[in-house]
Amino acid sequence: MAPLLTRAKGKSAPLGFATNHPRLGAALGALAISQSSPLAKLSGASPAVVTLFRGLFALPLLALLARREGHAPSRRDRSLALLAGALFALDLQCFHISIPLLGVALATVVPNAQVFIVGLFAALSGERTPGRAFAAIPFALLGLLMLARVVDPFGDSVIGSGVVAAGSDPALGVLWALGAATFYGLYLVITRRISTASSAVGPFTMLRDSAIGMIGTSFVLALLTGSLLPPDLGPGLGWLLLLALMSQVLGYPLINASIPHLPSVVGSVLLFVQPLMTLVAGVVIFGEIPTPGQFVGALVLFGGVLVAARK
């Protein structure tokens, strides 16, 4: 999924090297989070269980890093972070459901439409919305229709024998992935509000509190869906541990610390490179190959996102 865009604060942040070497930090962060959907699929766990263990495994390290920051958030900031974590759990629930339906790579592409969700909330709150953001919406919609294969100019003569199609139901997968984009956009709105309104919340402090909200929400989802049991104790939990370390502990914090120190064009490149690396993993590990129409649709959607997000 797309990187978090919250702000790293204070010299006490444990990722000082990422602020000193932002290109390296951002590249490592993008590589780490690009493997989220392949690792989730390899675990064989249900969507709610993936999210639950992703939070449980990450929380101790996040708590340790938050303690090193030495920040004491207010009750309001902590409550907002808990709410943000609940929204992030709903985002991941939709995202993990979309993976088998859309394929590991394309399921990573669609949530980038959160740019439009964040823009909508900004406009509703009275912020001036650039005209290019509105102009980019038709391109994003066309890209989504091509990803869903509602529009496919290349037809079905695409995938050779012995190759796994990238998703069992792309249209349904796009709908779930758009749900992920919506919840992720709401998550970003709240986390940005925390970072701009308070100087007492470090990146790991907020990630720790949001992880608690994520764990509680995913636990309820697992109970409601009857999928509380973990995957096999062997490889299943191992993949989930690796997922938690790479995404929650390494990937997102590295990008959080790096992005504010990079030109906007570099952030745009990262937005594109992350799902490209996921695509490579999908081909190598699962043999998933998007159709030419879906690949073009991903490029069209990215074009719209980049235009809308450009400063």
Image: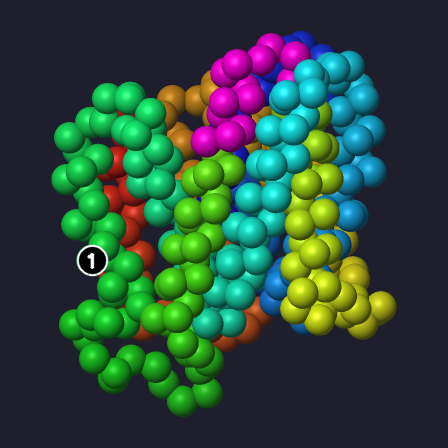
Q: Is residue 240 above or below residue 116?
A: below
Q: Secondary structure at mark 1?
A: helix
Q: Is residue 271 above or below residue 220?
A: above
Horizontal arrangement in the rendering, residue 232 relative to residue 244 (left or right): right
Residue range in magenta is 189-202
State the image quarter where residue 224 is shown. bottom right
State the image quarter where residue 268 is shown. top left
* Residue at the farthest bottom position: 161
Residue 244 horizontal/vertical position (percent): 70, 48
- Which residue: 19% across, 50% down? 139
Residue 160 horizontal/vertical position (percent): 36, 85
Between 157 and 74, the residue placed more toward the observer is 74
Horizontal arrangement in the rendering, residue 257 relative to residue 133 (left or right): right
Residue 188 horizontal/vertical position (percent): 48, 34
**Residue position for label 1:** 142
Q: Residue type at mark 1: give it.
A: Leu
